[in-house]
Amino acid sequence: MNRKKMRSSFLLLLTAFIWGTAFVAQSVGMEYVGAFTFNMCRFLLGGAVLLPAVLLMVRRVRQTHPEGSPSAARRSRIRDGIKGGLACGVVLFVASSFQQIGISMTTVGKSGFITALYIVLVPVCGVFMKKRIPRHVWLGVALATAGMYLLCVTESFTINRGDMYLFFCALSFTVHILVIDRVSPRADGILISCVQFFTAGVLSAVLTFLFETPRLAAILFAVSPILYSGVLSCGVAYTLQVIAQKDTDPTVASLLMSLESVFSLLAGWVILHQRLSARELSGCALVFAAVILAQLPARE
Protein backbone atom coordinates (compact mmCIF):
# COMPACT_ATOMS: atom_id res chain seq x y z
CA MET A 1 0.00 0.00 0.00
CA ASN A 2 1.52 3.35 -1.04
CA ARG A 3 1.72 6.38 1.21
CA LYS A 4 -1.28 8.14 -0.34
CA LYS A 5 -3.52 5.12 0.19
CA MET A 6 -2.30 4.68 3.78
CA ARG A 7 -3.04 8.35 4.46
CA SER A 8 -6.49 8.02 2.91
CA SER A 9 -7.23 4.89 4.97
CA PHE A 10 -6.25 6.65 8.20
CA LEU A 11 -8.37 9.70 7.35
CA LEU A 12 -11.39 7.53 6.57
CA LEU A 13 -10.94 5.59 9.83
CA LEU A 14 -10.84 8.89 11.73
CA THR A 15 -13.94 9.95 9.83
CA ALA A 16 -15.74 6.78 10.94
CA PHE A 17 -14.80 7.40 14.59
CA ILE A 18 -16.07 10.99 14.51
CA TRP A 19 -19.31 10.00 12.81
CA GLY A 20 -19.88 7.09 15.17
CA THR A 21 -19.49 9.20 18.28
CA ALA A 22 -21.53 12.00 16.67
CA PHE A 23 -24.61 9.76 16.91
CA VAL A 24 -24.49 10.43 20.65
CA ALA A 25 -24.35 14.20 20.09
CA GLN A 26 -27.26 13.99 17.64
CA SER A 27 -29.32 11.96 20.09
CA VAL A 28 -28.64 14.31 23.01
CA GLY A 29 -29.31 17.39 20.88
CA MET A 30 -32.80 16.13 20.06
CA GLU A 31 -33.71 16.47 23.74
CA TYR A 32 -33.68 20.27 23.29
CA VAL A 33 -34.43 21.11 19.64
CA GLY A 34 -36.23 19.64 16.64
CA ALA A 35 -34.56 17.65 13.88
CA PHE A 36 -34.54 20.43 11.28
CA THR A 37 -33.38 23.03 13.81
CA PHE A 38 -30.49 20.80 14.85
CA ASN A 39 -29.47 20.15 11.23
CA MET A 40 -29.80 23.83 10.34
CA CYS A 41 -27.44 24.83 13.15
CA ARG A 42 -24.85 22.11 12.60
CA PHE A 43 -24.68 22.44 8.81
CA LEU A 44 -24.47 26.23 8.79
CA LEU A 45 -21.80 25.95 11.49
CA GLY A 46 -19.95 23.33 9.45
CA GLY A 47 -20.02 25.60 6.40
CA ALA A 48 -18.85 28.60 8.44
CA VAL A 49 -15.91 26.58 9.80
CA LEU A 50 -14.73 25.86 6.25
CA LEU A 51 -15.43 29.32 4.82
CA PRO A 52 -12.02 30.80 5.83
CA ALA A 53 -10.26 27.93 4.04
CA VAL A 54 -12.31 28.57 0.89
CA LEU A 55 -11.55 32.31 1.02
CA LEU A 56 -7.86 31.50 1.45
CA MET A 57 -8.05 29.26 -1.61
CA VAL A 58 -9.61 32.09 -3.63
CA ARG A 59 -6.94 34.51 -2.38
CA ARG A 60 -4.17 32.15 -3.51
CA VAL A 61 -5.75 31.92 -6.95
CA ARG A 62 -5.76 35.71 -7.21
CA GLN A 63 -2.14 35.90 -6.08
CA THR A 64 -1.20 33.35 -8.70
CA HIS A 65 -3.09 35.39 -11.29
CA PRO A 66 -2.66 39.04 -10.21
CA GLU A 67 -4.50 40.27 -13.27
CA GLY A 68 -7.66 38.67 -11.92
CA SER A 69 -7.97 36.14 -14.73
CA PRO A 70 -7.34 32.60 -13.41
CA SER A 71 -6.75 29.85 -15.93
CA ALA A 72 -9.64 28.09 -17.63
CA ALA A 73 -8.73 24.89 -15.75
CA ARG A 74 -8.94 26.68 -12.38
CA ARG A 75 -12.25 28.33 -13.29
CA SER A 76 -13.57 24.93 -14.33
CA ARG A 77 -12.53 23.35 -11.00
CA ILE A 78 -14.22 26.14 -9.03
CA ARG A 79 -17.37 25.84 -11.14
CA ASP A 80 -17.40 22.04 -10.76
CA GLY A 81 -16.83 22.44 -7.01
CA ILE A 82 -19.86 24.69 -6.64
CA LYS A 83 -22.08 22.47 -8.78
CA GLY A 84 -20.84 19.33 -7.01
CA GLY A 85 -21.34 20.94 -3.62
CA LEU A 86 -24.92 21.89 -4.47
CA ALA A 87 -25.69 18.33 -5.62
CA CYS A 88 -24.05 16.80 -2.54
CA GLY A 89 -25.82 19.30 -0.29
CA VAL A 90 -29.29 18.40 -1.54
CA VAL A 91 -28.66 14.67 -1.01
CA LEU A 92 -27.00 15.31 2.36
CA PHE A 93 -30.03 17.34 3.46
CA VAL A 94 -32.40 14.48 2.60
CA ALA A 95 -30.22 11.81 4.23
CA SER A 96 -29.57 13.80 7.40
CA SER A 97 -33.24 14.73 7.81
CA PHE A 98 -34.24 11.07 7.77
CA GLN A 99 -31.35 10.23 10.10
CA GLN A 100 -32.04 12.95 12.65
CA ILE A 101 -35.74 12.09 12.89
CA GLY A 102 -34.93 8.38 13.12
CA ILE A 103 -32.35 8.82 15.88
CA SER A 104 -34.98 10.45 18.08
CA MET A 105 -37.07 7.27 17.91
CA THR A 106 -34.49 4.53 18.50
CA THR A 107 -31.12 3.83 20.13
CA VAL A 108 -27.75 5.19 19.03
CA GLY A 109 -26.38 1.69 18.35
CA LYS A 110 -29.26 0.66 16.11
CA SER A 111 -29.05 3.99 14.29
CA GLY A 112 -25.41 3.39 13.43
CA PHE A 113 -25.93 -0.12 12.08
CA ILE A 114 -29.04 0.70 10.02
CA THR A 115 -27.32 3.75 8.54
CA ALA A 116 -24.32 1.55 7.65
CA LEU A 117 -26.49 -0.39 5.20
CA TYR A 118 -25.42 2.12 2.56
CA ILE A 119 -22.14 0.18 2.47
CA VAL A 120 -24.01 -2.85 1.11
CA LEU A 121 -26.20 -0.74 -1.16
CA VAL A 122 -23.29 1.02 -2.91
CA PRO A 123 -22.07 -2.06 -4.83
CA VAL A 124 -25.65 -3.24 -5.42
CA CYS A 125 -26.31 0.04 -7.25
CA GLY A 126 -24.02 -1.37 -9.90
CA VAL A 127 -27.09 -3.26 -11.18
CA PHE A 128 -28.49 0.04 -12.46
CA MET A 129 -25.14 0.81 -14.08
CA LYS A 130 -25.19 -2.54 -15.90
CA LYS A 131 -22.33 -3.93 -13.82
CA ARG A 132 -22.04 -7.56 -12.78
CA ILE A 133 -22.62 -8.06 -9.08
CA PRO A 134 -20.39 -10.78 -7.54
CA ARG A 135 -22.02 -13.65 -5.65
CA HIS A 136 -20.52 -12.62 -2.32
CA VAL A 137 -22.26 -9.23 -2.59
CA TRP A 138 -25.62 -10.93 -3.02
CA LEU A 139 -24.78 -13.09 0.00
CA GLY A 140 -24.05 -9.86 1.86
CA VAL A 141 -27.47 -8.53 0.85
CA ALA A 142 -29.09 -11.70 2.22
CA LEU A 143 -27.20 -11.35 5.52
CA ALA A 144 -28.10 -7.66 5.75
CA THR A 145 -31.76 -8.49 5.18
CA ALA A 146 -31.68 -11.09 7.95
CA GLY A 147 -29.86 -8.65 10.23
CA MET A 148 -32.39 -5.91 9.54
CA TYR A 149 -35.18 -8.33 10.42
CA LEU A 150 -33.63 -9.09 13.81
CA LEU A 151 -32.81 -5.43 14.41
CA CYS A 152 -36.07 -3.83 13.37
CA VAL A 153 -38.96 -6.32 13.20
CA THR A 154 -40.48 -7.13 16.57
CA GLU A 155 -41.98 -10.48 17.57
CA SER A 156 -45.41 -9.03 16.72
CA PHE A 157 -44.14 -8.28 13.17
CA THR A 158 -44.18 -4.50 13.57
CA ILE A 159 -41.42 -2.09 12.55
CA ASN A 160 -40.37 0.94 14.57
CA ARG A 161 -41.09 4.08 12.54
CA GLY A 162 -37.67 5.44 13.48
CA ASP A 163 -36.02 2.37 11.96
CA MET A 164 -37.86 3.03 8.69
CA TYR A 165 -36.59 6.62 8.64
CA LEU A 166 -33.05 5.32 9.14
CA PHE A 167 -33.46 2.85 6.27
CA PHE A 168 -34.43 5.72 3.97
CA CYS A 169 -31.41 7.56 5.38
CA ALA A 170 -29.18 4.65 4.30
CA LEU A 171 -30.65 4.79 0.79
CA SER A 172 -29.95 8.52 0.63
CA PHE A 173 -26.36 8.15 1.86
CA THR A 174 -25.86 5.55 -0.88
CA VAL A 175 -26.62 8.25 -3.42
CA HIS A 176 -24.42 10.71 -1.49
CA ILE A 177 -21.30 8.54 -1.61
CA LEU A 178 -21.78 7.88 -5.33
CA VAL A 179 -22.20 11.60 -6.06
CA ILE A 180 -19.04 12.40 -4.08
CA ASP A 181 -17.14 9.71 -5.99
CA ARG A 182 -18.19 11.38 -9.23
CA VAL A 183 -17.49 15.03 -8.35
CA SER A 184 -14.50 14.89 -5.96
CA PRO A 185 -11.76 14.17 -8.54
CA ARG A 186 -12.71 17.27 -10.56
CA ALA A 187 -12.83 19.89 -7.82
CA ASP A 188 -11.38 21.04 -4.49
CA GLY A 189 -12.66 18.93 -1.60
CA ILE A 190 -12.95 21.80 0.86
CA LEU A 191 -14.98 23.87 -1.61
CA ILE A 192 -17.35 20.95 -2.22
CA SER A 193 -17.82 20.43 1.52
CA CYS A 194 -18.36 24.11 2.26
CA VAL A 195 -21.00 24.47 -0.46
CA GLN A 196 -22.76 21.24 0.50
CA PHE A 197 -23.02 22.31 4.16
CA PHE A 198 -24.47 25.71 3.36
CA THR A 199 -26.88 24.06 0.90
CA ALA A 200 -28.05 21.49 3.46
CA GLY A 201 -28.19 24.19 6.15
CA VAL A 202 -30.35 26.54 4.09
CA LEU A 203 -32.73 23.73 3.10
CA SER A 204 -32.95 22.68 6.75
CA ALA A 205 -33.65 26.30 7.73
CA VAL A 206 -36.61 26.44 5.33
CA LEU A 207 -38.19 23.37 6.95
CA THR A 208 -37.26 24.63 10.42
CA PHE A 209 -39.37 27.75 10.03
CA LEU A 210 -42.15 25.85 8.26
CA PHE A 211 -42.56 22.97 10.71
CA GLU A 212 -40.74 23.91 13.94
CA THR A 213 -40.46 26.86 16.30
CA PRO A 214 -36.75 27.45 16.93
CA ARG A 215 -35.94 29.17 20.22
CA LEU A 216 -32.56 30.66 21.10
CA ALA A 217 -32.72 29.33 24.68
CA ALA A 218 -33.26 25.75 23.45
CA ILE A 219 -30.42 26.08 20.94
CA LEU A 220 -28.11 27.30 23.72
CA PHE A 221 -29.01 24.25 25.82
CA ALA A 222 -28.02 22.07 22.85
CA VAL A 223 -24.87 24.05 22.06
CA SER A 224 -22.40 21.28 22.98
CA PRO A 225 -23.99 18.59 20.74
CA ILE A 226 -24.40 21.17 17.97
CA LEU A 227 -20.75 22.21 18.21
CA TYR A 228 -19.55 18.60 18.11
CA SER A 229 -21.78 17.76 15.17
CA GLY A 230 -21.11 21.03 13.35
CA VAL A 231 -17.37 21.42 13.82
CA LEU A 232 -16.16 17.80 13.97
CA SER A 233 -18.83 15.70 12.24
CA CYS A 234 -19.46 18.26 9.49
CA GLY A 235 -16.51 20.63 9.26
CA VAL A 236 -13.85 17.96 9.81
CA ALA A 237 -15.24 14.48 9.02
CA TYR A 238 -17.18 15.18 5.82
CA THR A 239 -14.22 17.14 4.49
CA LEU A 240 -11.87 14.26 5.34
CA GLN A 241 -14.24 11.94 3.44
CA VAL A 242 -14.15 14.09 0.30
CA ILE A 243 -10.37 14.52 0.45
CA ALA A 244 -9.61 10.87 1.24
CA GLN A 245 -11.90 9.46 -1.47
CA LYS A 246 -9.70 11.09 -4.10
CA ASP A 247 -6.94 8.52 -3.46
CA THR A 248 -8.91 5.37 -2.74
CA ASP A 249 -11.53 3.14 -4.30
CA PRO A 250 -15.14 3.95 -3.26
CA THR A 251 -15.63 0.34 -2.14
CA VAL A 252 -12.60 0.51 0.17
CA ALA A 253 -13.81 3.88 1.43
CA SER A 254 -17.20 2.34 2.20
CA LEU A 255 -15.59 -0.50 4.16
CA LEU A 256 -13.55 1.84 6.36
CA MET A 257 -16.43 4.24 6.94
CA SER A 258 -18.69 1.31 7.89
CA LEU A 259 -16.82 1.14 11.17
CA GLU A 260 -18.89 4.14 12.27
CA SER A 261 -21.59 1.60 13.18
CA VAL A 262 -19.24 -0.13 15.64
CA PHE A 263 -18.13 3.20 17.11
CA SER A 264 -21.77 4.30 17.48
CA LEU A 265 -22.66 1.11 19.36
CA LEU A 266 -19.68 1.52 21.72
CA ALA A 267 -20.39 5.24 22.22
CA GLY A 268 -24.07 4.61 23.01
CA TRP A 269 -23.08 1.93 25.51
CA VAL A 270 -20.26 3.88 27.23
CA ILE A 271 -21.74 7.40 27.21
CA LEU A 272 -25.52 6.94 27.21
CA HIS A 273 -25.59 3.48 28.87
CA GLN A 274 -27.91 2.17 26.14
CA ARG A 275 -28.28 -1.58 25.84
CA LEU A 276 -29.45 -3.76 22.97
CA SER A 277 -31.24 -7.08 23.39
CA ALA A 278 -29.60 -10.34 22.35
CA ARG A 279 -31.85 -10.36 19.27
CA GLU A 280 -30.78 -6.83 18.29
CA LEU A 281 -27.10 -7.60 18.89
CA SER A 282 -27.44 -10.65 16.63
CA GLY A 283 -28.91 -8.36 13.99
CA CYS A 284 -25.98 -5.97 14.39
CA ALA A 285 -23.55 -8.86 13.92
CA LEU A 286 -25.28 -9.98 10.71
CA VAL A 287 -25.38 -6.44 9.30
CA PHE A 288 -21.71 -5.90 10.05
CA ALA A 289 -20.81 -9.28 8.50
CA ALA A 290 -22.78 -8.24 5.41
CA VAL A 291 -20.93 -4.92 5.26
CA ILE A 292 -17.54 -6.66 5.40
CA LEU A 293 -18.55 -9.37 2.93
CA ALA A 294 -19.89 -6.88 0.40
CA GLN A 295 -16.51 -5.13 0.25
CA LEU A 296 -14.34 -8.19 -0.37
CA PRO A 297 -12.59 -8.08 -3.75
CA ALA A 298 -14.22 -10.13 -6.49
CA ARG A 299 -12.41 -13.20 -7.78
CA GLU A 300 -10.95 -12.78 -11.22
Image (cartoon, helix red, strand yellow):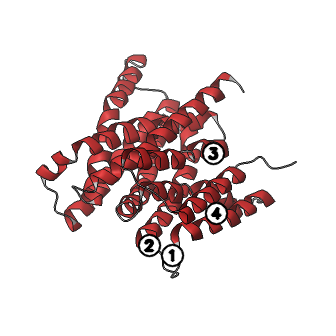
Q: Is residue 107 left or right of residue 143?
A: left
SS label for mark 2: loop
Comparing 141 with 274, the one in front is: 274
| Label 4, label 2: how far apart the Cα atoms are | 17 Å
* Residue type at numbered disc 1: Thr
Q: Is residue 149 visible?
A: yes
| Label 1, label 2: how far apart the Cα atoms are | 8 Å
Q: Nearer the viewer, mark 3 or mark 4?
A: 4
**Residue that label 1 marks:** 154
* Residue type at numbered disc 4: Ala
Can you say which quadrant of the picture contains the N terminus? top right
User: Label 1 neighbourhood size at 10 Å, few (<14), some (14-19), many (20+)?
Assistant: few
| Label 4, label 1: how far apart the Cα atoms are | 16 Å
Position of residue 152 relative to residue 12, above or below, is below
**Residue that label 2 marks:** 160
User: At x 46% / y 63%, what residue is drawn?
Assistant: 166
The mark nearer the N terminus, 4 or 2, is 4
Residue furthest out toward the bottom: 156
SS label for mark 4: helix
Q: At which x and y percent is residue 116?
A: 55, 54
Q: Quadrant of residue 247?
A: top right
Image marks 1 and 2: residues in contact by CB distance under 8 Å: yes
Q: Is residue 78 visible?
A: no
Q: Is residue 182 left or right of residue 161?
A: right
Q: Which mark is residue 144?
A: 4
Q: Quadrant of residue 10?
A: top right
Q: At which x and y percent is residue 216?
A: 12, 50
Q: At which x and y percent is residue 72?
A: 50, 32
**Residue that label 3 marks:** 255
